[in-house]
Every structure is written in structure tokens, then in C-alpha cells.
Image: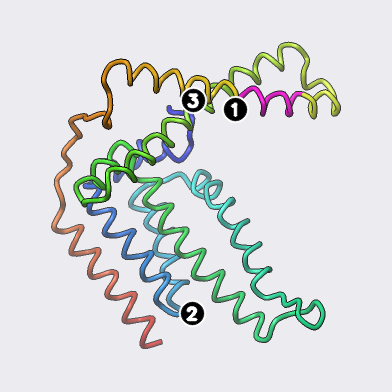
Amino acid sequence: MTGLAIDDAAWASAWRLRSPADKLLLCGGLVVCALALPAWPGSVLVGLAAVTLALGPARVPARTFGRAVRVPLLFITVGALTAVVQVGGGLGWAPDAAAQAGQLVGHAVAGSAAVLLLATTTPMSDLLPALHRLRVPDAVIEVASVTYRMLFVLLTSLSTIREAQTARMGHAGVRASYRSAGMLAAAVLTRSFDRARRLQDGLAGRGMEVGLRVLPEVLPSSRRFVAATLAGLAALVTVSVLA
């Protein structure tokens, strides 16, 4: 268990041993379809396909997938509201507000579901080497790797400090909880950046001027999976265009 529900789901997924390139092809194709096809029925079909694949063949827990999609849905809702409200000449709804909101929400939800399908089936330790083989710039991969590692530093600091506050009755009342929350945020950021700096100094002292090179696990591509992916994407495009 890593402490991140999405990461735990990726390690436990039935697609864990599938080639990251195959899953990138599938999820990337779904994202392109979600953005390029009409919201109805294209985005709806893409969203349903992503959710069905995640909960079905990939065996991602429904609760984990549902919790992961809540934050994107919040941002999508806020974005949809700001896109359909006009302020010129008085506050009011923009022309065709319902159609605009529906298209925005449809594209965004379908694309988010496709991205979450990749996130909940592919651990970062598999995804980063796959991106390197796809010629993604090393700087981009290094930033993603550092950000991923920092998440666990933040989670460890958060858990440790919160346990200490609870032991000292730091959450016994509303006022104490607010005060403890502020102190928790300040302490977590300070300790996390300090630990990150010390880790960086340690690596620099050992001559680590480039990214850490490891031997990734080689997961062979499946021709049947690739063929099914291409056929499924073609079917989505055909049904969306002809509908």
C-alpha cells in the first residue's frame, strides 16, 4: 500500500502486467475521441467506454474510481458555470447556455474518465519509462518523477503531524481544529521542502547530476489488445459520426 488510492488501484489492477504502451494507446485514443467527436453521442460513448473498461476488465474498485473523479467534476462544474455566464450589459446567461454547458461538460468528463482509466491501471514506475521510450523530453519526465516522489513526502509528513496533534487533543473542538489545521499546513510544507532539499543535497553530493537510471520491467505488447483497441476506437468514431 502506497498511501495513494489511485496508485494502490493501479498496482492491484488486472491490467497491471499489460504493456504501458498498449494502455497509452487506448487511453490516448479515448482522450482524442472525447475532444474531437461531438458531445452527443461521442463524449457520452467515450465516457461509458472508459468507465466500463475500468470497472470491468481492469477491475478497478468502483469506490476508488468514483472518489478519483470527484475533484475533476468540481473543476468541470465551475468551468461550465463561468463559460455560460455573461457579464456585458448585465449579469445573465449567455446565448445557447445549455448547449455550451452540455458540450463542455461532455468533453471534459469523457476526457477525465479516459485519463483516470490510465491512472488507475498503470503505476507511475511503469508509465515514466514508457514515456522515455516514446521520446518524451527528459526534463518533462524528471519533473513528473520529482512531483510523484514529493507526494509521498507530503503524505508522510501529514500523517505524522496529524497523529501528534490528535494525541495532544489538537482536534478536541472547532476552534482547536481550525488552529491545528493552520499549524498542520505550515508544518507540512516546511518539513516537506526541508526533506526535499536534503534529499537533493544528498544526491548532488553523490554526483547525481542526471536522473536516476533504473532497469524497468519489460512488459510485452499484446497484438490482440492493440487490435481490439483500434477496432473499438474505430467503432466509437463511426457511431458518433453516423448518429
Mark 1–mark 2 CB contact (< 8 Å): no
Q: Is residue 103 above or below residue 150?
A: below
The kind of residue on which mark 2 rests is Trp
**Label 3 SS:** helix
Q: Which residue is mark 2?
A: 40
Q: Is residue 88 above or below residue 22?
A: below
Left or right? Give the position of 96 relative to 133: right
Image location (x, y in percent) of residue 17: 24, 41
The picture quadrant where one finds residue 13 is top left
Magenta portion: prevailing SS class:
helix
**Label 2 SS:** helix
| Picture disc at residue 39 | none
Check the picture and name the quadrant holding the N terminus.
Answer: top left
Check the picture and name the quadrant holding the C terminus.
Answer: bottom left
Mark 2 or mark 3, which is nearer the start of the sequence?
Answer: 2
Q: Which residue is mark 3?
A: 153
Q: Which residue is mark 1?
A: 189
The kind of residue on which mark 3 rests is Val
Q: Is residue 2 above or below residue 134?
A: above
Nearer the viewer's eye, disc 1 or disc 3? 1
Disc 1 crowd, CA 10 A, few/some/many (<14, 14-19, 20+): some
Mark 3 or mark 1, which is nearer the start of the sequence?
Answer: 3
Mark 2 or mark 1, which is nearer the start of the sequence?
Answer: 2
Image location (x, y in percent) of residue 105: 56, 69
Image location (x, y in percent) of residue 60: 41, 46
Nearer the viewer's eye, disc 1 or disc 2? 1
Q: Residue at x 34, y 74 (%)?
A: 236
Q: Which residues are magenta?
A: 180-189
How far apart, in angstroms, are the residues tagged by discs 3 and 2?
A: 42 Å
Q: Residue at x 36, y 51 (%)?
A: 118
Depth check, front residue: 10 or 115: 115
